[in-house]
């Protein structure tokens, strides 16, 4: 009888579609590889973990943001967004002020050093995009972007119908 490790390496053949042919699986693989390399680049070049860099980019683009809006914009859960925002506040990159309409809520904005770091983050994102998608022509990148936007809109419409 083969060991579980050996059987895990041997592709299973049968009537079911191959796992690696599903688009969701392939997107997940690309995402994991991209996140791993991007996390390393953020740490090496900016001394920021991936979550904090994503939050800084979202705050810089959409400020002022509540923590709930930050979570949505940075594609993190609310707890991750809150912890990352607090780390950015402690680093002096983000200001946190109490909401005038809800004393429990806060608004997050960039400080001057945060604005400078935001520019560095955006330049790094731009470089990472060139590295990741450099194998595609400009037209192919535009097409892929349009297709991803379309799938995203479809998923948002489905989610809205479920709510």
Image (cartoon, rainbow, N blue to C red):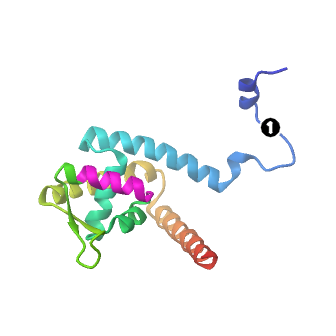
160 or 149: nearer the viewer? 160
Q: Is residue 78 magenta?
A: yes
| Residue at (34, 64) in percent of width and height | 67
Quarter of the figure that contains the N terminus: top right
Q: Give the image quarter of residue 2.
A: top right
37 sits to left or right of 121: right
85 or 114: nearer the viewer? 85
Quarter of the figure that contains the C terminus: bottom right
On screen, residue 97 above or below 4: below
| Residue at (55, 73) in percent of width and height | 156
- Residue 87: give x, y in percent of width and height: 26, 49
12 or 137: nearer the viewer? 12
The region drawn magenta spans 76-88
- The 10 Å Cα crowd at callout 1, few under 14, some 14 to 19, many 20 or more, is few
- Residue 11: give x, y in percent of width and height: 76, 35
145 or 136: nearer the viewer? 145
68 sits to left or right of 8: left
Q: Which residue is mark 1?
A: 12
Q: Can you see residue 127?
A: no
- Residue 108: give x, y in percent of width and height: 25, 65
Residue lying at the far left of the rendered structure = 112
Q: Is residue 50 magenta?
A: no
| Residue at (82, 49) in percent of width and height | 16
Please identify the dominant SS of the magenta region. Answer: helix
On screen, residue 31 above or below 157: above
| Residue at (41, 41) in percent of width and height | 37
């Amino acid at each position: 009888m083969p060991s579980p490790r050996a059987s895990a390496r041997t592709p299973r053949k049968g009537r079911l579609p191959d796992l690696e042919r599903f688009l969701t699986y392939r997107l997940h693989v690309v995402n994991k590889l991209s996140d791993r390399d991007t996390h390393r680049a953020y740490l090496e070049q900016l001394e920021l973990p991936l979550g904090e860099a994503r939050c800084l980019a979202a705050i810089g683009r959409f400020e002022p943001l509540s923590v709930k809006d930050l979570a949505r914009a940075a594609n993190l859960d609310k707890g991750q967004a809150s912890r990352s925002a607090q780390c950015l506040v402690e680093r002096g990159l983000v200001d946190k002020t109490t909401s005038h309409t809800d004393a429990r809520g806060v608004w997050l904005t960039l400080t001057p050093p945060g604005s400078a770091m935001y520019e560095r983050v955006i330049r790094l994102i731009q470089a990472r995009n060139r590295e990741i998608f450099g194998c595609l022509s400009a037209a192919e990148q535009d097409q892929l972007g349009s297709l991803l936007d379309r799938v995203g809109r479809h998923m948002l419409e489905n989610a809205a119908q479920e709510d």
